[in-house]
Image: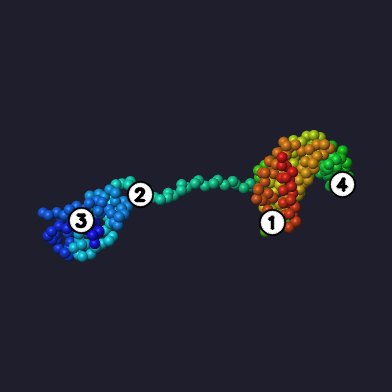
Amino acid sequence: MRGIDNLSGEYSSGQRGQTVNLLAYAYGGSNPSSPIPLQSAATFGGRAAPGNESMPPAAHRCASVHSRQARNRGVFVVAAPLVVAMLAASPIGPQKPGSEAPAATQAAPKQPPTPTVDAPKPDPSLAAAYVKLVGELPKADERGSTSWNALSLDSRGLVADARFGDATVAQLTKSLSELQPVVIKLIDLTKRTAVIPPNAADAAGAKAQEIEASTKAAGAMRGTARLLTGDASRLFVAGKQQEASERLAACLGLVRQLANGSELHGLVGAGIVGLVEERVAIMRKGVAGRKLDAAAKATILKALDALDPDQPLGVALTGQAASRAKLSLSSLKANLAP
């Protein structure tokens, strides 16, 4: 037990206080005890207790009393060095304001909410404007065939689509040239940010008049796309690529305005994308030695990128319609690549 003596120092002679109610203070009396050396109190088993390199005087006194009281009772507390280490590491008395240990982690500052972009609002006047302009276009014959939507394009040049009448390429070209004031008005309509109202037939209890109006609006926008793609073909062959690309970009503006969540309008939009993709594919390969240039591609691509990336048609189509629409969109983007 020699190591114990090294820890506690010497005992004083005489009794100080009662054995039951021990003194709460270190009374030295006329024969005071020897102080506990710092090295003795901070060492146990040859190892220095952490945090005891600079023990305060109060810790010396507490360690001395604790050790003597334990020895007087015949009990040796092995944890004494640990108690001394804790006392030495923690200052006695209240801490000064602001001396508290910093929190391990701090709450992250609140980020401002991300602003949401309002969805385009349906505009009944937009649909009515398309119906009015397209309804005023001239008809070729009593069957109602038009003289402006049959002009198409292939690798050799302009062609007349016999499905839309008996007009020749020369007649169709002349008709489209005369319709430029209407074409400009239609292009301006496609730049409006609103969408046309959803198909009335989708709503329960819709009236027959409302359903007819929705059908006319969809038909007018499909007719607008045929007019614009035909005029784009005419201008491209004439060497006016930028004007041609503006008309194809306007067709994609129609698709954006049709993206209102209605399945009928989504199908019409898919058909318009197919028309644009067909023309762009031919122009990219070349028509009579002319190919779609970089500036024209950029104009059309900008309009394509304006469509919603998740729902470009405004509705999730199903079956073959969905497959064709997806193929047309991916092919169009590939043909517009530099």
Near mark 3 (Cα within 10 A), the count class, few <14, some 14-19 or many ≥20, is: some
Amino acid beneath label 1: Asp
Label 2 element class: loop
Quarter occupied by the N terminus: bottom left
Label 1 element class: helix
User: Disc 3 versus disc 1: distance between alpha carbons?
Assistant: 98 Å
Residue behind mark 1: 202
User: Disc 2 versus disc 1: distance between alpha carbons?
Assistant: 65 Å
Q: Is residue 238 left or right of residue 108?
A: right
Residue 240 is drawn in which quadrant?
top right
Residue behind mark 4: 162
Q: Which mark is first along the chain, 1 or 2?
A: 2
Label 3 element class: loop
Quarter occupied by the C terminus: top right
Residue behind mark 2: 101
Residue under the image location 74 percent in, 49 percent down:
328
Amino acid beneath label 2: Ala
Horizontal and vertical percent for residue 315? 68, 53
Horizontal and vertical percent for residue 55? 26, 50
User: Disc 4 versus disc 3: distance between alpha carbons?
Assistant: 119 Å
